[in-house]
Amino acid sequence: MDFDHYERWNPYVRPKGLARRGAEVEYSFRMNPANPRFWRVTATLSECEPGAHLAFDVKLSRLLLSIEEHFRIEPAPEGARLIHIISCKGLIARLSLPKTRRNFEVLLSETDRFLTQYLARPRAKPPAKVMRKKGGRRP
């Protein structure tokens, strides 16, 4: 698993680093995809199972705000089901901030829409294998 194609389906987050459970990665995020400026923080990968579960633990401040973002793909009768959860903890999360809640709802919805489109795209076929004739003259 790597983060090379992450920006193709997530306009809000740009993780960089080693995709391994327990690893610390650079986690750049923004709340508005029209804004080119990202905030950079360090996140810990609390879960990292390729094709199944990816989770970031982002601590913006020990007591003020901690964010966990989970992506889980589970088998379903129609194919697969995406579960995307963002949970906020800390003093700021306890405040009644309707605009911030609305921003997170939009972020979840948009990220899920882009990820669904990305996963549904047709996959490129691997290049055809070149067959060479065996035999012929040898020196």
Image (tube, helix red, strand yellow):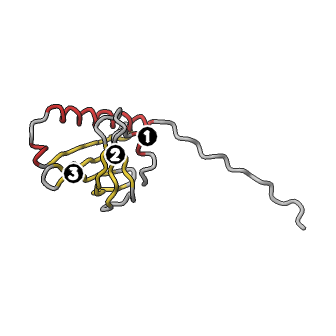
Local SS, label 3: strand
Pointer 2 or 3: first along the chain: 3
Q: Position of residue 26 (x, y in %)?
A: 34, 54
Q: Is residue 129 left or right of residue 13?
A: right
Tell me the tag on residue 73. 2
Q: Residue furthest bottom?
A: 139
Residue marked by disc 1: 8
Q: Nearer the viewer, residue 133 or 36?
A: 36
Label 1 amino acid?
Answer: Arg
Q: Amino acid at mark 3?
A: Leu
Quadrant where the image shows the N terminus: bottom left
Report the Cα–Cα distance between label 2 and label 3.
27 Å
Q: Nearer the viewer, residue 55 or 11?
A: 11
Residue count near mark 1 (Cα–Cα under 10 Å), binned few <14, some 14–19, many ≥20: few
**Few, some or many C-alpha atoms within 10 Å of disc 3 (few <14, some 14-19, many ≥20)?**
some
Where residue 76 appears, x then y in whole percent?
A: 34, 41
Quote the CA–CA distance across marks 1 and 2. Answer: 18 Å
| Sequence-earlier tag: 1 or 3 | 1
Pointer 1 or 2: first along the chain: 1
